[in-house]
Amino acid sequence: MLDSQSAHLKALDSADLSHLRAILNAICCETGKPLRAPETQEIAALLISLYRHGVADQNKLLSVGRLASARKRRR
């Protein structure tokens, strides 16, 4: 059952996923981490969540993804 907040989340189509995949690919190239790495999958989930909540600016998503990646490397 969906809660009231998730009912208002943006559904993703193939164009949205392609947009997010391009951002994630850029992060993978910068970090040298494969797309299937657990850390990369966590960043992907974060990007999807932000996008579904209305953050669609590519530069903002890339910045957040880079920041999340940097924090994961420090741990």
Image (cartoon, rainbow, N blue to C red):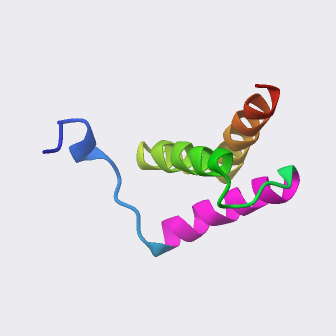
Determine the residue positioned at 46% across, 44% down: 49
Residue 43 at x, y = what percent?
62, 45
| Above/below status of 53 relative to 44 | above
Secondary structure mostly seen in the magenta stretch: helix
Residue 2 at x, y = what percent?
17, 44
| Above/below status of 16 relative to 53 | below
Determine the residue positioned at 32% across, 47% down: 9
Q: Image quadrant for the C terminus?
A: top right
Q: Quadrant of residue 73?
A: top right
Determine the residue positioned at 66% across, 44% down: 39
Residue 20 vs residue 72: left or right? left
Residue 8 vs residue 15: left or right? left
Q: Which residues are magenta?
A: 15-30
Residue 9 part of the magenta segment: no
Residue 26 part of the magenta segment: yes
Q: Quadrant of residue 70?
A: top right
Determine the residue positioned at 73% across, 40% down: 63
Residue 33 vs residue 10: left or right? right
Residue 71 at x, y = what percent?
75, 29
